[in-house]
Image (tube, grey):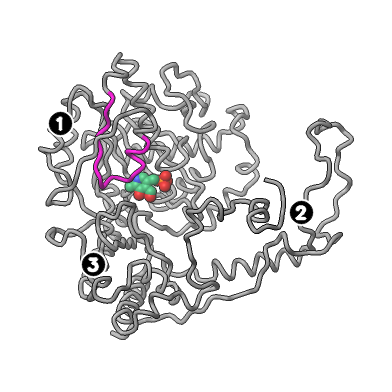
């Protein structure tokens, strides 16, 4: 089989930042005088002088952003960005989100004028209930970590109602759980107990038993974890924590490989979260906007953040009357457009499509595993575990680094020279040295996956033959290797133009 190596070179423009462009007096659009006189803006709040905005014509603005897009988005390669379940975001969903009856509504409008939005929020809630076995979902959290925080807030409210707040003050998690689990537990005032991994790739039941007590508030755990390892003892874990009087929260960010194959509630969990911007096809790129769907049992439902969308005899309404609610996690009912896109994805897939997608994602990963295992310099994490992984596998380039000096970050950069998106490594701390975690999900074709692996194999061979080419990459991108040191140096980084001007000695106010 001959390798499929794409030829690629990014566009490169000498493009100044927009504030350094244009000419005084040049305009794209002419507006009537600003309606200052009508008193809309109180005098004390008005600017003394106009803002220093760049002055450009419309074609200049268009050309500038096109050039930037060519340099940054021109690649649109194959992204096997593991632990993130990258999905195709259908333009039809975008088109619906832009309709005025979506885009120009406000959640504070009377409920009877929001029936469309509330209706699909309710219907997605029903669909997620069917997938998880939970009794109620809310979409207020602004991402997966926010949903983990929601669980901590719900746990506090639940403990308070039982008179146990302050007594049960420990949350148990594992070193391999996503860092947002211990972080949100700590942010909500809990003491965090972190279990370590043992020979199977997860903590043992004995370890869990040794830490549960009458101080246990909750377990927060994901399964499969980011290494693609599924803990088969999970039901027993839940039983042990329940016996000690704590709640169990399932971080279902890695849901893709087990969609419709298991239900969190049937495993005994009291609550779970899904990420609509991962598994359910809402956009993820560019870091958002994201939604963490938080679902729980009927026992915990009174403690959910308000408002909750409910269906009554007269249609849908926002229920704010929830005296035991943990309060707000975000405004109103969350990002309705993202919920709509996830609803569109879920409805389009249907129950059969979702089950098939789960199987395809596991199949794709195990196909990749078989090919990656034949490439020298690579090692599967926990090589002693021979059972197949789920929808992703954490791999290591430690042998490659030892033999050639080329690191996983060097390989990642060099692959972009062939039009392949940077892959995901692993959260810090790197428990697996030189880690990388590709995840294909169900959306990439076999040719895409083969092309991705062909490029990886080519770069690894290059590392053995000519390591410097890989170490000094990228060579075919708009910019070359960056020195990231200034990102950790407050004296040098700038998050605004004003700060940049000041840092570079060009003056300006802070
Ligand atoms: C397992 C797991 N849990 C939680 C999160 C946090 O989600 P978010 O980035 O939306 O806050 C992630 C993010 O990738 C994750 O992989």
Residue 306 is tagged as none
What is the tally of numbered marks visible in this picture?
3
Q: CA distance from mark 1 to mark 3?
A: 34 Å
> Is 215 part of what is drawn in magenta?
no
Question: Residue 449: x, y in percent?
Answer: 34, 70
Question: Is label 3 in a helix, a strand or a loop?
Answer: helix
Ligand 1 lies under 8 Å from the Cβ of mark 3: no
Q: Which residue is mark 3?
A: 369
**Is 364 placed above or below 472 here?**
above
In the foreground, 288 or 137? 288
Ligand 1 lies under 8 Å from the Cβ of mark 2: no
Name the side, left or right, on which 258 lies relative to 240.
right
Say which label, 1 or 2, has the lower sequence index.
2
Q: Residue at x 51, y 47 (%)?
A: 289
Say which label, 1 or 3, has the lower sequence index.
1
Query: In the rendered structure, which segment of residues is drawn in magenta?
Result: 169-184
Q: Which residue is mark 2?
A: 53
**Is 228 placed above or below 166 here?**
below
Q: Residue at x 28, y 58 (%)?
A: 392
**Visible in this render: residue 145?**
yes
Q: Residue at x 15, y 36 (%)?
A: 208
The quadrant in which residue 337 appears is top right
Say which label, 3 or 2, has the lower sequence index.
2
Q: Residue furthest top?
A: 163
Q: CA distance from mark 3 to mark 2?
A: 52 Å
Q: Which residue is mark 1?
A: 240
Ligand 1 lies under 8 Å from the Cβ of mark 1: no
**Visible in this render: residue 353?**
no
Question: Is label 2 in a helix, a strand or a loop?
Answer: loop
């Amino acid at each position: 089989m001959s390798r499929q190596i794409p030829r690629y070179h990014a566009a490169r423009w000498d493009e100044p930042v927009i504030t350094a462009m244009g000419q005084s007096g040049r305009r794209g659009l002419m507006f009537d005088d600003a309606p200052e006189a009508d008193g809309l803006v109180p005098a004390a709040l008005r600017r003394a002088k106009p803002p220093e905005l760049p002055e450009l014509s419309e074609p200049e603005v268009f050309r500038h952003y096109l050039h930037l897009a060519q340099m940054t988005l021109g690649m649109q390669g194959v992204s096997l960005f593991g632990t993130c379940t990258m999905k195709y975001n259908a333009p039809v969903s975008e088109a619906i989100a832009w309709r005025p009856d979506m885009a120009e509504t406000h959640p504070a409008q009377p409920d009877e004028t929001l029936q469309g939005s509330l209706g699909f929020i309710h219907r997605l809630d029903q669909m997620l209930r069917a997938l998880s076995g939970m009794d109620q979902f809310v979409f207020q959290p602004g991402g997966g970590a926010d949903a983990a925080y929601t669980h901590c807030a719900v746990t506090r409210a639940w403990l308070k109602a039982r008179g146990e707040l302050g007594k049960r003050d420990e949350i148990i998690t594992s070193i391999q759980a996503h860092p947002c689990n211990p972080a949100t537990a700590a942010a909500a005032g809990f003491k965090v107990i972190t279990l370590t991994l043992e020979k199977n790739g997860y903590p043992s039941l004995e370890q869990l038993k040794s830490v549960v007590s009458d101080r246990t508030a909750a377990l927060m755990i994901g399964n499969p974890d980011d290494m693609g390892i599924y803990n088969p003892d999970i039901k027993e874990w839940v039983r042990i924590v329940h016996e000690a009087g704590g709640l169990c929260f399932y971080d279902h960010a890695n849901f893709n490989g087990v969609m419709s194959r298991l239900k969190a509630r049937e495993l005994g969990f009291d609550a779970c979260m899904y990420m609509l911007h991962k598994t359910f096809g809402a956009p993820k790129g560019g870091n958002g906007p994201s939604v963490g769907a938080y679902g729980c049992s009927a026992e915990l439902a009174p403690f959910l953040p308000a408002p909750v969308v409910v269906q009554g005899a007269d249609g849908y309404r926002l229920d704010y009357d929830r005296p035991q609610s943990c309060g707000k996690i975000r405004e109103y009912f969350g990002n309705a457009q993202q919920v709509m896109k996830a609803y569109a994805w879920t409805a389009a897939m249907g129950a059969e499509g979702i089950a098939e997608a789960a199987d395809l994602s596991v199949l794709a990963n195990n196909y990749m595993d078989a090919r990656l295992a034949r490439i020298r310099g690579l090692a599967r994490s926990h090589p002693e575990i021979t059972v197949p992984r789920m929808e992703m596998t954490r791999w290591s380039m430690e042998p490659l680094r030892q033999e050639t000096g080329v690191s996983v970050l060097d390989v990642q950069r060099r692959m972009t020279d062939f039009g392949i998106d940077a892959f995901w490594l692993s959260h810090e701390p790197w428990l697996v040295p030189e880690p990388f975690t590709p995840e294909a999900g169900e959306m990439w074709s076999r040719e895409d996956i083969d092309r991705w692996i062909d490029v990886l194999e080519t770069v690894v061979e290059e590392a053995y033959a000519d390591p410097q080419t890989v170490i000094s990459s990228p060579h075919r991108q708009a910019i070359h290797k960056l020195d990231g040191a200034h990102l950790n140096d407050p004296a040098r980084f700038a998050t605004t133009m004003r700060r940049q001007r000041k840092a570079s000695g060009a003056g300006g106010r802070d």
